[in-house]
Image (spheres, coloured by chain):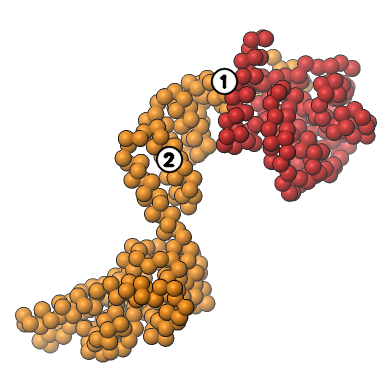
Chain colours: A orange, B red
Amino acid sequence: MAIKWFGGGKKPPELQEHSIDDLIVLERYEEAGERLRARLKDNPNDLHSHLKLAEVYTQLRQFERAVDEYGFVAEEYAQDGFYDKGLALLSRAMKLAPLDSSLATRVEKFQRDKDMEHVRTLALEGLQKAGGVEAGTSMLELRRLWSHLTASSLVQHLPGEQLKRLFSNMEMLRLGAGAELAREGSQEAFLMLIVTGVVEATMASAERSVLVRSFTTGDLLGEGAFLERAPWPADYRAAEPLVALKLSRGGLEQALTGNPDPRGFLETLREQHNDRDVATSVRRLRGGS
Amino acid sequence: MAILAIRIYPDPILRVKCRPVVEIDARVKKLAADMVETMHAAPGVGLAAPQVGVDLRLAVVDVSIGENPSDVHVLINPEVVERSGLDSDTEGCLSLPGITDKVDRPAFVTVRAQDLGGHPIELQAEGFHARALCHEIDHLDGILFPDHLRGLRKERVRRQLKKLADEVEVHA
């Protein structure tokens, strides 16, 4: 019994209770679990308590529950960008449930997201140079724009350093709805990556405009004119307000200067077959009209 | 003066967040004197009130362990107001006999407290002295040095704590 000094003060409720940590040390896991669950009821996002509860469930050999707790905390860590911590917890969970294939899937996802995090840092540096901050675009806005681009095939195939190199030599454009980007038959050489908005490729047919194809976030336009010196296969127009990154020939030269893998860089740009697809559609539509 | 019984882990008093000392009366002064004597007899370089079963924010520190009377500090309602640097060194505790481990602490601290006359005092300390102050002030918040450990160190100390708790139970 603790000596009571200055009576009249309220007795602290925990005076005669062990702490949760001490209950775990004393291997009184049931009591520790109860206290932790009560604590989590009041504060469901207390990650330390979730981790302790996972440990308690492990000691009680309630592995399924332990895996749930580890998984919850791992997700929270990953959402905050702490992928390594999340992966470490999933690894612990996998030891408890080696046959749970969903854990392996989550590990793969975390690993992918982690890799993308590195790419993101480099890409943002590139976007800053693309006229981002100087043109009045805040870092927050750049991050938002980047989040649109992550689904792009181009972004997924170019390594981070190459993305940074590409973006650094592009120009960020903001165009209103209806802005003309290219006319059919012209050979204006530029490459355009749509960040947000929609571009429509149309062709004139019997005094009316026929929509050939729509492009949106992450699509790359102009590789035919830019890399193959082919004419633009249709008219391209912004169907709604557009944010896009534009690469000129000068920009491409800069991006290739000192590039450790110029061939791979160009191949990735060439792999975007959007112009070729539009040209094929136009030929088919015209052939059939 | 008297030598007080030192509370040993897992005594729950060691986990209590202590109450501030409101009035420095004769009982507090006697407690402080007894704590200094207990600390020297142990021997130890610091002792906090919960270690002798009292849930008050009072600690005594003497890094000379009785060699130099000017090194004895009685700290009432102490708090660390500034900390800087990092120092890693081995630490033990009179309430955790036989258990030691390396603990990271600030290399420099400034502590504000009251003395037995109720006057505000400020101590600036570094190295081992800073460590002792932090350790004792931790006690007043129910924190023990193993709480600062992570990973394998924590696991190892946890086993030692269990062993200690079992021994305490046997002797109780």
Question: What secondary structure is marked by label 1?
Answer: loop
Which residue does the image show at 68% across and 30% down from the upper left? B144
For label 2, the crowd category at 10 Å Cα-Cα, with few meaning under 14, some 14 to 19 and many 20 or more, is: some
Which residue type carries mark 1?
Leu
Residue at the (45%, 68%) spot, across then down? A161
Residue drawn at x 89%, y 17% as measured from the top left: B1
Q: Quadrant of the N terminus of chain A?
A: top right
Give coordinates of residue A231: x percent, y percent.
24, 87
Name the residue carrying label 1. A26
Residue B77 appearing in the image: yes
Label 2 chain ID: A
Q: Position of residue A193 (x, y in %)?
A: 34, 74
Which residue extends farthest left? A288
What residue is pinned by disc 2?
A91
- The C terminus of chain A sits in image quarter: bottom left
User: Disc 2 residue type?
Assistant: Ser
The answer to which of A268 and B32 lies nearer the viewer is A268
